[in-house]
Amino acid sequence: MLAAIILVPLVGAAILGLFGKRMSERVIGWIACSTVAVSTILSFYLFFEHRAALEGGEKLHEYLFTWISVGTFRTDASLLLDSLSAIYILFITFVGFWIHVFATGYMRGDKGYWRFFAYMNLFMFSMLTLVLADNFVLMFVGWEGVGLCSYLLIGYYFTKDFANDAAKKAFIVNRIGDFGFVLGVFLLFSKAGTIFYFNDTARGIHGAFDWAMTQSPDPLTWSAIFGGGITSVAVLLFVGAIGKSAQLPLYVWLPDAMAGPTPVSALIHAATMVTAGVYMVARASSIYIHAPTAMMIVAIIGAATALFAATIGLAQWDIKKVLAYSTISQLGYMFLACGVGAFGAGIFHVFTHAFFKALLFLGSGSVILGMHHEQDMRRMGGLKKYMPITFATMFAGWFAISGFPLFSGFFSKDEILYRSFIANGLPDSWARILWFVGAVTALVTAVYMTRLMVLTFWGRERFSTSEPAPGADSVPGGHEDHPGPPHESPASMVLPLVVLAAGAVFAGYLGVPEGLSGGKITNYFERLLEPSIASLHVMEPGHAQRTPEGTPLETRAEAPARMPEGHGLERTLTGVSILIALAGIGIGWVWFKRKPLWEPPRLLEEKYYVDELYNATVVQPIKVGSTSVLWKVIDVHIIDGAVNGAGHLASMLGSTLRYLQSGLARSYVAIVVLGALLIIGYFVMK
Amino acid sequence: MRISNCESRNSQSAIRNPQFVMVPLSWYLGLSALLFTIGAVGVFIKRNAITIFLCIELMLNAVNLTFVSLSGFFGDVGGQLFVFIVMTVAAAEAAVGLAIIISIFRNRESLNVDEVDTLKL
Amino acid sequence: MQTDFQTIATQAMQFIMPEGILTLFACAALVLDVMLPRDRKRFVAWVSLLGVGLAFASLWILYTSIVSKGTPRTAFFDMIVLDSYAVVFKSIFLIGAALSILLSIKYLEIEGEQRGEYYGLILFSVIGMMFMASSVDLLALFISLELMAVSVYILVGYFRRDKKSNEASMKYFLLGAFSSGVLLYGISMVYGLTGSTNLAKIAAALPIVASANFNPFGAAAPPDMRYLLLMSMILMAAGMFFKVAAVPFHMWAPDAYEGAPTSITAFMSVGVKAASFAMFGRLFLYGLPDLRGSLAGDPASGIPSLPGWALLLGIVSAITIVWGNLGALTQNNTKRLLAYSSISHAGYVLLGLIAGNQTGYTGFVIYLFIYTIMNLGVFGCIIALRRRGIVGDRMEDLNGLMKKAPGLTVMMTIFLLSLGGIPPTAGFIGKFYLFAGLIETGNPWLVRLAILAVLMSVVSLYYYIRFIRAMYIEGETEPQPVTLAPSLRVALVAAAILVIYIGVFPQRLIDLTQKAATSPGLKTYSYQQGATKPAEPATPPPARGMPGERDRQTATPPR
């Protein structure tokens, strides 16, 4: 059953890839959407079928076949459904399905329609494999699969240089992360002797996480990173997550990845693939809680990325770039949550984010299409009346991401902020700093999202309706570039917007923080996740003393103690969050209504010159080094010398061989006899 | 093809029939080694394909001599069976070998193997 | 009480059912050839293919009903054994034969040599191969080897009017007959020393014969019989080295491979080689297991200890790998290049025998399996280049192939990468097992051998990439289009899929070959124990790779 969830999109991809060229767009769209729909239905069915079991923390293994078994190393193609992967497959298939539907409208008329949907289905297959795998190797298969699909889809408009460059950039930067990931898995295998997640007695396999739970935690020291212990494993795995989830310092590929079609940005670069890093960290939570140093690194990098990307987002003019930086920033939030031990909150934010960010991207896609492939917000404005549904749905997304009370983003973000405030794995001052950074980020987020909305939907119409927009989006010859006023998108695009908007508004109610309701409403989401995630024993501030660093590690059997008196602090912090959100929206509204084209500081607009910095410190030195040193000196002189030398040697040997290979049968016999005599001689002399 | 009585051959106290050993075994073996060497040397000093082929036959027959003498020495029929098989195989090889040599001769009008050297290097 | 004849008729025959079926079909092919008109002769190919298919089916039935059930069964008075080792090798030969027949059909038509005896001879040689894999008696091994060899001599010279084919055949024949003589002399010496031709009995007698003070004649000053034993071992090894084309007994291979019809080159580079390795394994692992490590001497009376065959194989495989790969670097004829490549692959396969452990044996079998498929694939691609007026065996003939036949190019690339051992192709799995087996021993010399092998397989990439460069980068030099005959296409696609499938999901094949590598009678050796054994005499140092101690894990020889 689990296998079917994975395989149906693969079948779709295979059909489209092999025969898609000769199919009509309608058929292609039907195949692509229906395969994902089947996966979606199966996912929901499985979830509700096994709901009680999942809530009880049961793990459903599905063994397909043993992939490789060499000595003690064993890898199975086998799947695992627990509450964590269940949540993931639910929103991946659900959001994925609606994005597929959206794409059938968005990509209409494109020459590579079949290719696009083949890749999209292949992506769904890879992503579901990543999530449902029950061991690190199979996860890595999915991990690389999504990387491949991402590469293919970013470079989808392969005739455009910028798309190719962006694809290459994404690919190379991701390789750096993957390298860390692979090393981490290797190290884990050498430590734990297995690459499976959990014990499975039916197959007689041991799990790395069960192994990790028996380990004593590493101390909170920087030297632990290079100690080759569990901290090293955690840090190396996190390097993989940094690459895949676009965190500092490897985030640079994600903004460029917007060169792909907008549905791709929504599906891969907002809702699903980029959260794979968060998934992996949460999945490996039992490793992370034994590596406090790694947790701290995760938290710091997450918080830093969140703030850093948010400020850049403030100053972008390209509507998709704003959303890209916003994604990076929100991913930072998720890592912040993981880093402070609130894995559940992190996953909850992944969940809500999937809805509202997919919605925002699709909305922006709708805007771009309505504007005839215009992405620059300076040439938009006043679109409210042209595209009312897009506006209304994006409005929901805007409020959700800004953390407006009672929208989904509000609950998840609030939870993260609260949990980082009370983080007990870290020194107190660090927890406060992390909270503060998070809060500032929330403010900036609200501001730039308001800016995006204001610039797009309100104010003066800064476009001319007569000429087609120059520097258009990347769809070459796809959607016919007819001039004319902006228009609302077709139903196939609007419907997903509406559905996702509903999600953006209501998804948060699955996980209302218990502090808010005073414990009256259970935080269903967190309760569901609890069994799948190893947690630091969260000590409420009202609760007595803080346990010393590193020791307060409890298995999931002991659920966090919920102290009613702690709700006071939580409510206070929630109040602060609400104020921040309102303030952000207010500032943005007032400021950008007045000066929509306000020039942001150059430093921000140029993204802190990070690309230039990388170019100067990494790319150019490598280029120069490889040209002047590696190529001109080492390659030409040493390697070519060596190769030529070896070549000369080889050809010398070759000519010797050639003399031996004289073509004369008798000399062959002579050599055979000589060889035999040499061997016999050697053995006799021995 | 039951190999008779061969379990007892392995032991150090190999039983031999003294009346059978008219000529010592080592002489047979020495002669066959000599024949084998002559054959092997002949293969790479002779130029005529037929002669080379005959030298190979000589090698095979040297082996036959070994087998027969050992077989007699052991009183074991297995070695003699081997001789029959080797003779049969040699005949088959002779048929094929001569056919090959004939087709070479047809194409090149020569039996000198040193002139057959288009395939080399 | 059954008579021998009844036993044979009722029980033993079923053990050689696949061979029996093939014999029938081989004879049928010869007869059909006479009956069919000239333009219908390709029918014989399909009949032969049917025969191979039926043989495969009966082999499968034998496997599921007998072999997989338990201990190996012997028949014909311990001449033939039916165990997993035999079954896996037989399936290799049958797959090889089926692919070769598919490759041949169109090729022979272009050459105008479509005749039934060709297929008959292929089937006869396959019968020989199959008996080679399951014989456990020197007599049976020798007959089956010759059955294979004589058929292949003819096949190499199959194009009677082609000078190259003649010449290749003559060289192959003269050297082959010579090496048979050498092998036979070794066999006769072993017979003389142990008094038996049965491998199990030889293995049982070896500990006595190989002891330093073996004195069968009760002489006062006994000659050191171990030298004689080693001599016979070397002579047999030389005969086998010749068949698998290991340096320095490889000289025939480039010439014979280049001159033979390409389809036969393909067939002999995989079938003959795999069969010879099967026999090699039988001879050395089943027959001469105690000659592997050093033969303990007697330091008290000044008798030196002597090295065993593992050292011999180690040296030969090192030279073979280096020589084969270097030789291939400078070749421009693709068939000749692949001949050198196949020489180097023989060196790799030897590594599995040298390692002497479970992993090594698995690698030995699995690599031959994979090698059969990928090498036939490459040769199939070269056969596809044979068109009217174009021989297609020069490197330039590949130029610009990507534009002419992209599907063929992609398949060729897969096969080449697999030969180079690049994941995720099957070749990687095979090489992985071979090298892992060596490294597992922990013996420093064997680890060095593994490193050498890895380095040389990097070198081998150079010439495999030359093909790829010619196909993708070079502009086309020959305008004539390349079309794939349906039979060739089927063979190539099947081979390509298998190569990728095994590369990605190797487990099933590993399970199968592991069974072959654990058949009773195969001895595994542990180096670690030998290294720690203090009683080991000082000469030769264990660092030579030949510690004498070994533990007998599966001590029962095939009954």
Image (cartoon, rainbow, N blue to C red):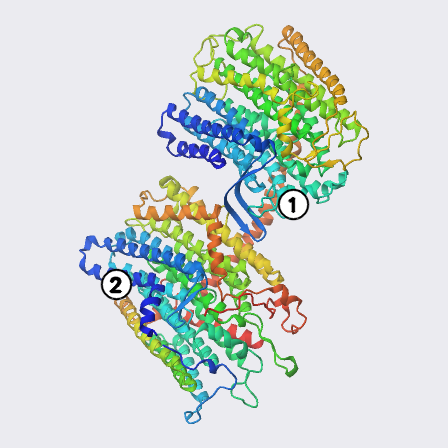
What type is the residue that disc 2 sits on?
A: Cys
Of all chains, the one bearing label 1 is: A
Q: Does A145 appear above or below C329?
A: above
- Reading the image, the residue beneath label 2 is C27
x then y, percent, for residue A232: 69, 41
- As drawn, A495 above or below C550: above
Instruction: Indicate the position of residue C175 as horizontal and vertical percent values.
Output: 39, 69
| Pointer 2 local density, CA inside 10 Å: few below 14, some 14–19, many at least 20 | some
Along the viewing direction, whichever of C464 and B121 lies nearer the viewer: C464
Q: Secondary structure at mark 1?
A: helix
Q: Are marks 2 and 1 in contact (CB under 8 Å)?
A: no
Seen from the viewer's position, the closer of residues A489 and C164 is A489
Decide: few, some or many residues near mark 1? Use Cα within 10 Å; few <14, some 14-19, many ≥20: many
**Residue wearing tag 1:** A187
Name the residue at 53% across, 72% down.
C291
Q: Would you identify the image quadrant in which residue A307 lies?
A: top right
In what quadrant of the picture does the N terminus of chain B appear? bottom left
Q: Which image quarter is the C terminus of chain B in? A: bottom left
Callout 1 amino acid: Leu
Q: CA distance from mark 2 to mark 1?
A: 60 Å
